[in-house]
Image (spheres, rainbow, N blue to C red):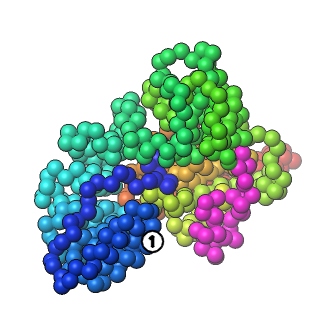
Amino acid sequence: MRSHTHRPVPAKRNTRANVGGAAQPGMAWVSRYLEARAQESAGDTAKAIRTLEEVVRSVPNEQAPRFDLGVLYTRVRRYPDALRELYEVTERFPNDGKAAVEVAKVLLRLGQPKLALTFVRRALALDSSNVVAMLTLAMIFKDLGNVPASRDVYEAALTIAPSDAALRMPYGMTLVLLGEWLHGWKELESREAYFGTEFLYGELPKTPRWDGQSSLVGKRLLIVHEQGLGDSIMGVRFAEELASRGATVHLRTEQPLVTLLGAARGVAECSVHRTPLPEHDLHIPLMSLMHALEVTPDRISGAPYLEPQGDCPVEIAARLPADEVLTVGLTWAGNPLHENDHRRSIPGAMLAPLLQLSGVRFVALQKSPPFESVLPTELQQHVVDIGACCDSFNDSAHALRRVDVLVTVDTSVAHLAGALGVPTLLCLPQVPDYRWGLTSATTPWYDSVTLLRQQEHGSWEGVLADAQARIESLRDNLAVRTRLPHIINESGR
């Protein structure tokens, strides 16, 4: 479960500056400002931004329009513009702790956690009970690699706002990251209050929710899709246990996963998310399985549990021949809409030393974005594009079965490879997604996955050097194995 792709804006706090500040001649701007707020409330953010830009030009010394403009720039990811406007508010109104927090948030998005720390401390000096500032401080500590300090800040904030789902969600993830899985899964049940059921599930069934304790014998259990494709791949492993308890398991998932996950052990039926609900007796959201089943590392088997269905598509088979060339799959960029994509994705230009290795076939499994858009033109000739041939995850599974090793960032392809048992080098930022922990080179989720971790915030050089050394070793070992029969024959003459 990620607080990731297409994450909605959480329920708004009262973060607006008051209409006021240094008075300007005339009040005609107020009606235009209120019009911008109405446009925002109606969901027309672009129009609201244009109106606020006009208002700020007409009354540059007013606090509220500039503050709101900065917040909306942040929402549409115009971070430099947001920083300019919000910083100006902090300069003109140094006692505005809300603006200082917003500046800190933008700096965090721009990869400047130390600068962000300065502004969030200013906000907390103005109001030590500012929960939004505490939440931001926890995020900054995590970004700086001090995850225990992040947990401590969440716990302090929860003493002030114990029912705040915007605190409990990241707190739960932080606990799991630190290895406190059972407590973390419980806290992550707050995600419904944080995201909203419509966003998470589309339609939440009206049947009873399975609590992990009641009998499943003779029951039709619906696993409700939520969150990311990687989460679905990771979570489908539990269908086998549910079936062993007597359930007939019906899995809901996204269309590209239906063929593959519908054949997973324990899954009796599979349907597409947001189509009419099937008949069932009980339901449980996919990511609630961890809490209901009380999942801990020692309860997970990292053995492969998925198999590609049918024959390998002809085009994929043609591009990935079974020969003696070491074949390395690559996925180096994730969905750019993912809120942490700037941390997890590797700039394509950094792959140059790797892609220039001789005796290696590199295969791009990029789907979104396609490799042409994230790899410099001069490097594209070194890569076979397989992602363009994959219309489903079942196609991708066939492709992965034809590579010797996958080098990937933290995307759904990593989960797919792990579930298939494909040797995988997973490149992780210094502070990764909650499920990967903080220190180990292995993961209980997938036996075939090796974790390559950044040693310094934002630095991929060491990770890629490690991956390159491993690939060179595999290439050289393969060459020896390939030549060994010839060497034996020649020595016997």
The residue that appears at 37% across and 59% down in the rendered structure is 457
Label 1, on which residue? 46
Q: Position of residue 322 (x, y in %)?
A: 80, 51
Q: Does the stretch in magenta take in 372?
A: yes
Q: Would residue 312 appear left or right of 22 to someone viewing this image?
A: right
Q: Position of residue 292 (x, y in %)?
A: 46, 26
Q: Position of residue 240 (x, y in %)?
A: 62, 25
Image height of 101 relative to 286, above or below: below
Q: Would residue 13 appear left or right of 125 to someone viewing this image?
A: right
**Numbered range of the magenta stretch:** 366-395
The residue that appears at 63% across and 59% down in the rendered structure is 366
Closer to us: 212 or 280: 280
Closer to us: 25 or 445: 25
Q: Would residue 18 appear left or right of 188 to someone viewing this image?
A: left
The residue that appears at 72% across and 54% down in the rendered structure is 390
The residue that appears at 67% across and 38% down in the rendered structure is 271
How crowded is the residue under tag 1: few (<14 C-alpha within 10 Å), some, or many (20+)? some
Q: Does the stretch in magenta take in 135?
A: no
Q: Would residue 378 appear left or right of 493 to someone viewing this image?
A: left
Q: Image quarter for residue 291? A: top left
Image height of 472 relative to 175, above or below: below
- Describe the element under mark 1 as helix, strand or loop: helix
Q: Position of residue 480 (x, y in %)?
A: 71, 50
Residue type, numbered disc 1: Ala
Closer to us: 463 or 241: 241
Q: Image quarter for residue 253? A: top right
Residue 74 makes an appearance in the image: no
Image height of 358 relative to 144, above or below: below
Residue 368 makes an appearance in the image: yes
